Amino acid sequence: MSKKIVLKIGGSLLFDKEYNIMHEKIVKFAEIIKDSDDIVAIIIGGGKLARNFINSARDLGANESLCDTFGIEVSRLNARLLITALKDLAYPDPITSLKDVRSFSLWNRILVAGGFIPGQSTTSVTFEIAESLDATDVIILTNVDGIYDKDPNKNLKAKKFDEISILDLEKVIYGETGNSQSAAGEYRIFDAVSLQILKRSHIQVRLSNGEDFKTLRKLLVDKAYESNIGTKILRNP
Ligand code: UTP
């Protein structure tokens, strides 16, 4: 059976330490996407620039909903950059709602989106679009190799999971506290909406490193779908 993949590119993959857009990375993503047959939609995060705007807005007295709106706007700008690099392969404007997903998918171009509405992350958008398009797979690209038992950026002894069940994933995300609250700009890798759709759908999910273009090509172009690249999420029996 052929795959229908929805790809999420974390915003952290697009900016350097000085908040400059890493143009050459967008070109590399576009090359791999062009060579892959299975990608139907791509969602881009807001990255550091979104967090910068969100923090400024919060300091100016914005409520969380308005802060989220800044994140959404920045992610849509990032989406427009990728569309520019993909040229005719992509639908020419960032997708902003599920209604547009349904209508514009009839054009048979790759749909590219940033955020949709306040109160969620671009990972939620990824799952919302995947469910709406009957996608078989979601691949989430971040700046680490997969899901770890602890934050790998803070803990050298963090251990990567090759596979993890949804149940264990929830334990890793929410820890012992069970706290699922998130402020604008601080949604975890899976927030409440994305977890909900993950649980009720049949979508296969994998997290992988979006900085390792060789491995990414192996996954998306050479279709190494059965490999141990990144972390695969196992559906509970
Ligand atoms: P994300 O936090 O999802 O982007 O969106 P990101 O930079 O890719 O995150 P990482 O790299 O996966 O960690 C940026 C911000 O935009 C708002 C939220 O405030 C979010 O933190 N947003 C995004 C929404 O409010 N609604 C959406 O549908 C998407």
Image (spheres, rainbow, N blue to C red):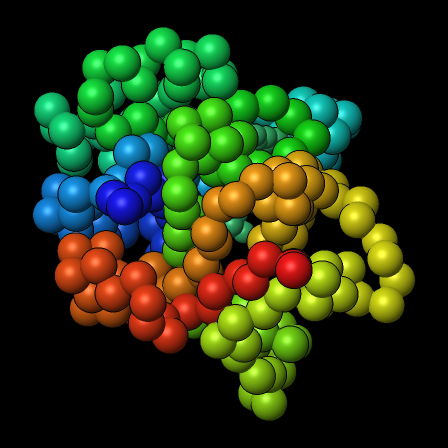
Q: Is residue 133 above or below residue 25?
A: above
Q: Quadrant of residue 76?
A: top left
In the current view of this chain or complex, which residue is farthest to the bottom? 157
Residue 179 at least partly seen = yes
- Residue depicted at 62% across the width and 73% down the height: 151
Q: Quadrant of residue 222?
A: bottom left
Q: Is residue 163 above or below residue 112?
A: below
Q: Is residue 185 above or below residue 130?
A: below
- Residue depicted at 47% across the width and 68% down the height: 231
Q: How many marks?
A: 0
Front-lying residue, 140 or 25: 140
Place of residue 80 in the rendered image (x, y in percent of width and height, measured from the top left): 30, 27
- Residue depicted at 40% across the width and 47% down the height: 137
Q: Quadrant of residue 152?
A: bottom right
Q: Is residue 13 left or right of residue 152?
A: left
Quarter holding the C terminus?
A: bottom right
| Ligand 1 sits in quadrant | top right
Place of residue 66 in the rendered image (x, y in percent of width and height, measured from the top left): 67, 23
Q: Is residue 43 left or right of residue 128?
A: left
- Residue depicted at 41% across the width and 69% down the height: 230
Q: Is residue 151 left or right of residue 219?
A: right
Place of residue 224 in the rendered image (x, y in percent of width and height, measured from the top left): 25, 65
Residue 73 at least partly seen = no
In the current view of this chain or complex, which residue is farthest to the right? 177
Place of residue 31 in the rendered image (x, y in percent of width and height, measured from the top left): 12, 48
